[in-house]
Amino acid sequence: MGEQDDRGLTRIQRRNRELILEGALTVFSNSGFRGATIDQIAGEAGLSKPNVLYYFASKDEIHKTLLTTLLDMWLAPLSNIDPEGEPLQEVLDYVAAKLRMSRQYPRESRLFAYEILRGAPHLTEILGGRLRGTVEDAVAILQDWMQSGRLRNVEPHHLIFSIWSMTQHYADFEVQVRAVLGKGHDPFSEAQEFLDDLYRRLLSP
């Protein structure tokens, strides 16, 4: 039924998997893991329940696949911090990338937040492994810049945590943000200007 990819799936099979994961993203981000059902995911994907279960053995497997993919995407901008780059601009570019992801991928951000609030049962090993390793690599770069006087000396782990919270807030609490600001505001554009100024003031040596 078409060319196979590395995992031996045909084009139609790849398309069906993508439909299932896209449908599951909508269901999980709206209802959380406990409120989601295979029937809901099948309906959102436009496939039958047996068809969904042909590709994924359980709701847990779908959820874990989504979360793993999301974490890879979420970590990419942090991994892209260039130790040879201009320190302040590298941090500001990371902030901008995280805010851009919150604008473009609000469902993914909410899904990740749901998982963390549940105690991250599907992400415990990943959080302690790949996430921690990626953060520690970035911390080492930040510490080097701070020790050489190219960035103001602040605690680097908490700097990263603050960037996460300040940017992902606009996805996870978008309804609240828009309600408070009212019509005529673009929260993300305004946040970009605010955060750029905030971190320049915080980190300029």
Image: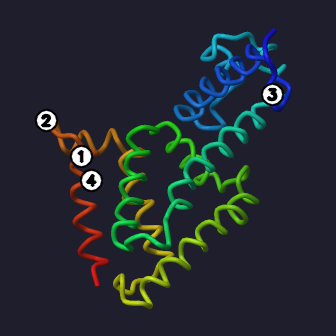
Check disc 2 and report the residue beneath it.
Answer: 184
Q: Which residue type carries mark 4?
A: Gln
For label 4, the SS is helix
Q: Are marks 1 and 4 in contact (CB under 8 Å)?
A: yes
Decide: few, some or many residues near mark 3? Use Cα within 10 Å; few <14, some 14-19, many ≥20.
some
Measured Cα–Cα span from mark 4 to mark 2: 16 Å
Residue 168 has which mark? Answer: none
Q: Position of residue 80 (x, y in %)?
A: 52, 59
Q: Position of residue 121 (x, y in %)?
A: 72, 52
Depth check, mark 2 against mark 1: the one in front is 1
Decide: few, some or many residues near mark 4? Use Cα within 10 Å; few <14, some 14-19, many ≥20.
some
Q: Are marks 3 and 4 in contact (CB under 8 Å)?
A: no
**On the rendered structure, is 118 left or right of 50?**
left
Q: Which residue type carries mark 1?
A: Ser
Measured Cα–Cα span from mark 1 to mark 4: 5 Å
Q: Earlier in the sequence, mark 4 or mark 2?
A: 2
For label 3, the SS is loop
Residue 189 has which mark? Answer: 1
For label 1, the SS is helix
Measured Cα–Cα span from mark 2 to mark 1: 12 Å
Q: Which residue type carries mark 2?
A: Gly
Quadrant occupied by the C terminus: bottom left
| Residue drawn at (41%, 52%) of the image | 97
| Residue drawn at (49%, 83%) of the image | 143
Check disc 3 and report the residue beneath it.
Answer: 56
Q: Position of residue 87 (x, y in %)?
A: 39, 74
Q: Are marks 3 and 2 in contact (CB under 8 Å)?
A: no
Quadrant occupied by the N terminus: top right
Residue 192 has which mark? Answer: 4
